[in-house]
Amino acid sequence: MKNILCILFFFCPFLLFASSPSRGMMAIHQGEGTVSVSWKLFGSDKGNIYFDLYRSAPNGKKIKLNAAPLTTSTYFLDKQVDTSVSQTYLLVVGYGKSKATKQVASYELTPKLASVPYFSIPLQPLVFDTAHVFQPNDASIGDLDGDGEPEIVIKRMGAFYACSQKGMCPHTLILEAYKLNGKRLWQIDL
């Protein structure tokens, strides 16, 4: 398996990264022109925060997607989207009754990204594993380098072995950290 599918980002939009200046906005095409858009809510956000979500097509026309300010969710379903052209989602934040708002995030959904309902990260091959024995087995996310964007930690273990019993696994475990663009940050042989 050369890629790890990162569907978990859409099932965990509530993840809080306290050091994060980024809302971690993502958009995934669910099929039939429906796009799921999610972003993070910070633990430091005030209780009177609200969000407005816009979509901007290549022609530059911005469309406000929500009829009322979004106050109870960081997840939005955008329907009837033309995914054959790039669509840019813009997130605007405001507080209370104030008219002052600020764009805090954007995400470009290209036709290539919209062609599948998941986010894929290419895994780099292990130099010593020419037989492809080590397969991805588990994953966790977190902000590992303090840049506000989530990274993913992958556990790879030897295939075809019952590693739950001491002494039964002839291979070690490998932990790797990746940026969402596929850049490997580090690798540890346990």
Image (spheres, grey):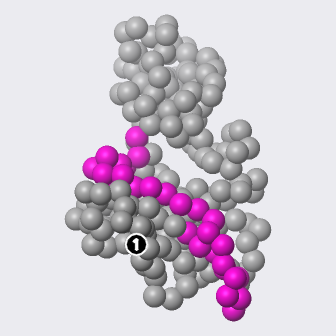
Outermost residue on the bottom side: it is 97
Q: In this view, does 86 lie above or below 43?
A: above
Give the side of residue 71 with respect to residue 63, left or right.
Answer: right
Q: Where's residue 163, x and y in %?
A: 49, 23
- Total labels: the figure holds 1
Outermost residue on the front side: it is 59
Amino acid bearing label 1: Lys
Callout 1: SS:
loop
* Residue 13, visible in the rendered structure: no
Look at 50% across and 33% down and name the residue there: 182
Location of mark 1 (residue):
61
Q: The magenta stretch spans which residues?
A: 91-120
Q: Which of the 4 image quadrants contains residue 25? A: bottom right
- The residue closer to the viewer here, 189 or 71, is 71
Q: Is residue 153 above or below residue 125?
A: below
Look at 31% across and 46% down and name the residue there: 112
Look at 60% across and 41% down and name the residue there: 151
Query: Per the image, is 92 magenta?
Result: yes
Q: Where's residue 184, x and y in %?
A: 57, 27
Q: Where's residue 127, x and y in %?
A: 49, 10
* Residue 74, visible in the rendered structure: yes
Query: Per the image, is 131 magenta?
Result: no
Q: In which quarter of the image is the N terminus?
A: top left
Look at 39% across and 33% down and name the residue there: 3
